[in-house]
Amino acid sequence: MHRRASASLSIAALVVLSVSGCAKGSSPSAPPASAPAAAGKPALAAKPAQDPLTSAVLFKRLLDETDLGQGYTRKKESGQGDRDDVTVIGCPALEKLGGGAAGGDLDFPNSAKATFSYNRGTGSEVAEELYSDSVDKLGPNTRTVFEAMTGCPLYQVVVGDAPIAVTTQKLPAPALGDEAWSQLLTFTAGGRDTVMKQTAVRDGSILVVVSGSPALVDTHLARAVGKAHG
């Protein structure tokens, strides 16, 4: 089912970033204005694609180090077998969508993803995921996932056997694409808080999801949507 896998990966992507030390308990400053990624909002002149794009095309539209600027290193993607199981406790909406099966990809036919470390003294990370499917599936399924994730202000995820408390806050959606969703999450484990932001933008048949430190998500979101738009 589309919705079951959607919830699973949204949780997994955020948990993987948070437990890897993203933000080191605080939100870093955004990259300097001279970096390419700090340019203004890209112009979206052409109409966004309505037909699903292949994974190969999506891969070419991911952000890379040239887009992000100095201080970013692309991380090697780990295989699905390297992921711990992620189980959701205390959020019936997410449990109903299948939050425990976090190993799989979104159940959209085409996808591409990349994760970058930002090494300017912060140790923070930012991840981008691109998905493509028909508009009548992409929009409703993504909306269901974000409504479920922001519908529970406090719940718990268990990664392997390690419990992590999660608090969520729905944020105003950015004025990008045809539909957009955004949330702020705080992961608490071992006495340390990690603040994360996740924003998704549907532009035609393309879904752009950017997750990570709030300052980095805000800095790179418009550029990610512009490049994914092609």
Image: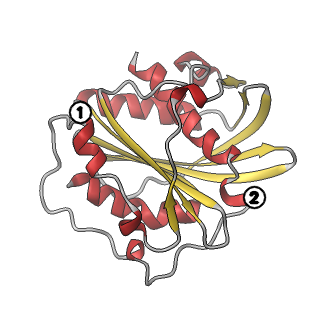
Which residue is painted at 43% across and 72% down in the image? Answer: 69
Which residue is painted at 32% across and 56% down in the image? Answer: 225
The Cα–Cα distance between marks 1 and 2, rounded to whole angstroms, is: 37 Å
Work out whether residue 43 or residue 104 is closer to the camera in this orientation and state it.
104
Residue 214 shows in the view = yes
Q: In which quarter of the image is residue 175?
A: bottom left
Which residue is painted at 19% across and 34% down in the image? Answer: 52
Pinpoint residue 140: horizontal percent, then vertical percent. 35, 29
Vertical side of 91 occupied by 193: above or below:
below
User: How many marks on residues?
Assistant: 2
Pinpoint residue 120: horizontal percent, then vertical percent. 61, 73
Tell me the SS state at disc 2.
helix
| Residue at the extreme bottom | 34
Vertical side of 211 occupied by 112: above or below:
above
Q: Quadrant of residue 226?
A: bottom left
The residue wearing badge 2 is 25
Tell me the SS state at disc 1.
helix
Query: Cβ–Cβ below 8 Å for labels 1 and 2?
Result: no
Work out whether residue 185 or residue 29 is closer to the camera in this orientation and state it.
29
Quadrant holding the N terminus: top left
Q: In which quarter of the image is residue 40?
A: bottom left
Tag 1: residue type?
Val
Residue 203 shows in the view = no
Number of the front mark, 1 or 2: 2
The residue wearing badge 1 is 135
* Left or right: where 28 falls relative to 144: right
Pinpoint residue 171: horizontal percent, then vertical percent. 53, 52
Quadrant holding the C terminus: bottom left
Which residue is painted at 67% across and 47% down in the image? Answer: 18
Work out whether residue 72 or residue 11 is closer to the camera in this orientation and state it.
72
